[in-house]
């Protein structure tokens, strides 16, 4: 399985974080009225108690815009200073133009180049890695990376195995170059990989060029999320553990050096399996999935912002971000906060 390791030669720093979740809460009790499930069944298998659902007319770019504003405010920058916007999403506003272009319009970032990336739940960390290259090569100075999803638009609300898992939301960071090497929140090393042999265990089979939605197949719900839960679990645990160990080793660190790990917020069992195997205690593991469920590319971004704003991470801490998603894709980044 191909995997890349990237040490950060130029000092790239996270200048600001932000997040946004819709107001509407869909609880496990609400889902009991919709499908054959229970709060006990969902909580014991996933750790999720509620998730946020976008309002009617609220799009992925709307969620992304609010998170972007929060990150810009935290970084103390204005829209005209941003020269690149990357949105990681699997639920774009439309096939084209890029959701990043809608965000650009909404915030008035007229000097920015914009594009989307699709790496599912790993997308936000892929976006950070791409941004590092733009900054390190001197092609861009101030980058806005956003993970944003409106997964409620692609969930089969009659499938109890998947509809209980997902929610809507967005998280963002502003990345800049610290030429003096004095700032904190430094990106130290990243490890990314993918395995296209496992595309079928987590996917949306219809809606693209391979299987357009037609009047003949519209009732088959081919444009909704399909998942083989057991296979995803096994692959996620192995891939995220390996990516984390590789990224840490790239800067001569080990699991014992980690002050806080912020994993993809998909399933509490997956998180506990990863941290247990690496010997990272619960008090050094940031978890918020009980409130939001799996928000795909937004999950790590939202969690990072919450960890930052609640002081769960502090200056000098070694922080690990790690994610796993459809593709299959995985990624981990090590930071010194």
Image (spheres, rainbow, N blue to C red):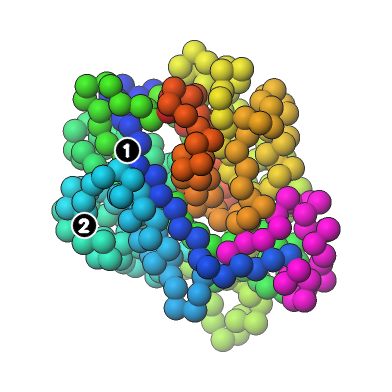
Residue at 69% across / 23% down in the picture?
Answer: 279
Location of the C terminus by quadrant is: top left
Q: Which residue is mark 1?
A: 15
Disc 2 vs disc 1: Cβ atoms closer than 8 Å?
no
Which of the pair 163/185 is nearer the observer? 185
Q: Position of residue 194 (x, y in %)?
A: 53, 39
306 within the magenta span: no
Range of the magenta residues? 29-52
Which of the pair 27/209 is nearer the observer? 27
Location of the N terminus by quadrant is: top right
Q: Badge 1 local density, few (<14 within 10 Å), some, or many (20+)?
A: many
Horizontal relation, residue 104 to residue 70: left or right: left
Relative to 256, residue 292 above or below: below
Residue at 67% across / 61% down in the picture?
Answer: 50
Q: Badge 2 local density, few (<14 within 10 Å), some, or many (20+)?
A: many
Q: Position of residue 21 (x, y in %)?
A: 50, 60
Q: Position of residue 43 (x, y in %)?
A: 77, 54
Relative to 160, residue 280 above or below: above
Q: Residue furthest front?
A: 310
Horizontal relation, residue 50 to residue 209: left or right: right
Res. 29 visible in picture: yes
Res. 197 visible in picture: no
Q: Nearer the viewer, mark 2 or mark 1?
A: 1
Q: CA distance from mark 2 to mark 1?
A: 17 Å
47 within the magenta span: yes
Q: Which mark is residue 109?
A: 2
Q: Residue furthest top?
A: 252
Relative to 216, residue 4 above or below: above
Nearer-N-terminus badge (2/1): 1
């Amino acid at each position: 399985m191909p995997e890349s390791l990237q040490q950060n030669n130029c000092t790239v720093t996270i200048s600001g974080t932000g997040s946004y979740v819709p107001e509407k809460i869909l609880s496990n009790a609400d889902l009991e009225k919709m499908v054959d499930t229970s709060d006990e069944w969902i909580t014991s298998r996933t750790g999720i108690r509620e998730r946020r659902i976008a309002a009617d007319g609220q799009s992925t770019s709307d969620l992304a815009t609010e998170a972007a504003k929060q990150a810009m405010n935290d970084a103390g920058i204005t829209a005209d200073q941003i020269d690149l916007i990357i949105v990681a999403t699997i639920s774009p506003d439309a096939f084209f133009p890029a959701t990043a272009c809608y965000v650009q319009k909404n915030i008035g970032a007229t000097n920015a180049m914009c594009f989307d990336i699709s790496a599912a739940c790993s997308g936000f960390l892929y976006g950070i890695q791409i941004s590092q290259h733009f900054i390190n090569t001197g092609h861009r100075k101030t980058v806005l990376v956003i993970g944003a999803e409106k997964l409620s638009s692609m969930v089969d609300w009659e499938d109890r195995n998947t509809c209980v898992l997902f929610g809507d939301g967005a998280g963002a960071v502003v990345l800049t170059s610290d030429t003096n090497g004095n700032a904190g929140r430094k990106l130290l090393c990243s490890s990314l990989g993918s395995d296209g042999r496992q595309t079928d265990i987590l996917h949306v089979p219809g809606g693209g060029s391979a299987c357009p939605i037609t009047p003949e197949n519209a009732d088959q719900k081919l444009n909704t999320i399909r998942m083989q839960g057991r296979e995803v679990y096994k692959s996620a645990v192995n891939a995220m553990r390996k990516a984390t160990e590789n990224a840490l080793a790239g800067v001569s660190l080990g699991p014992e050096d980690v002050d806080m790990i912020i994993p993809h917020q998909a399933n509490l069992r997956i998180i506990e399996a990863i941290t247990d195997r690496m010997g990272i205690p619960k008090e050094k593991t940031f978890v918020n999935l009980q409130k939001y469920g799996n928000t795909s590319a937004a999950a790590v971004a939202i969690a990072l912002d919450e960890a930052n704003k609640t002081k769960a991470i502090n200056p000098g801490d070694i922080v690990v971000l790690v994610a796993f998603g459809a593709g299959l894709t995985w990624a981990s980044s090590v930071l010194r906060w």
